[in-house]
Image (cartoon, helix red, strand yellow):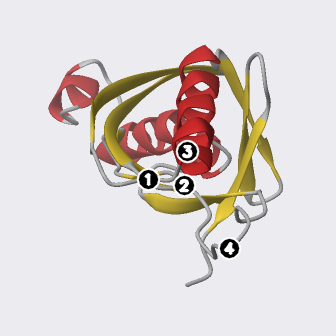
Amino acid sequence: MRLSCFVRHGLSAGAAAAVVFFTLMPAQSQSQSGFPFGSELRMDARPLKGSKRVPYVDIAANGSATIDMWCDSVQSQFVIAADTVTVLIGQRTQRNCTPEQAKADGELLDALQQATNWRREGDGVVLIGARQLKFRPSTN
């Protein structure tokens, strides 16, 4: 937004700067409570028996993400509009998983694809659909 268009309509440069500042301010405060793009989020779950691994999502500022599940990983895209979410799932790795891990990975992918809404919960996020999935910022 150029300040010259405000000055042309009778506003001083200082007044024009104030208009720009106060126009952008709500968007900035909304982004602080918005979806946590640009972060690594760990799923709020216990590891599977015999493992220490817990799924996590490494989500970039543009919504592209890598989801490391119980065994496999998948590239994805998170599309956020207000409180709605769509998770687009890409190619899945084909690791040598146990039947229990493969089943858990499939259930997680199903839950992610069925998520329709999201909300902030403290410093984490909850994806809402057929099943609620809670994620917290990674502390590693």
According to the picture, the residue beneath numbered tag 1 turns out to be: 97
For the residues labelled 4 and 2, the Cα–Cα distance comes to 12 Å
Q: Are marks 3 and 1 in contact (CB under 8 Å)?
A: yes
Question: Which picture quadrant has residue 46?
Answer: bottom right
Residue 2 on image: x %, y %: 18, 33
Which-is-in-front pick, marks 4 and 2?
4
Amino acid type of the residue tagged 2 in the rendering? Trp
Q: Residues within 10 Å of mark 2 (few under 14, many from 20)?
A: many
Q: Is residue 6 above or below residue 102?
A: above
Residue drawn at 54 percent across, 31 percent down: 106
Q: Which mark is residue 50?
A: 4
Does residue 63 appear to the left or right of 41 in the view shown?
left
Give the mark nearer the N terminus: 1 vs 4: 4
Q: Secondary structure at mark 2?
A: loop
Question: Which picture quadrant has residue 126?
Answer: top right
Q: Is residue 82 above or below residue 72?
A: above
Amino acid type of the residue tagged 1 in the rendering? Cys
Residue drawn at 35 percent across, 30 percent down: 11
For the residues labelled 4 and 3, the Cα–Cα distance comes to 13 Å
Give the mark nearer the N terminus: 3 vs 2: 2
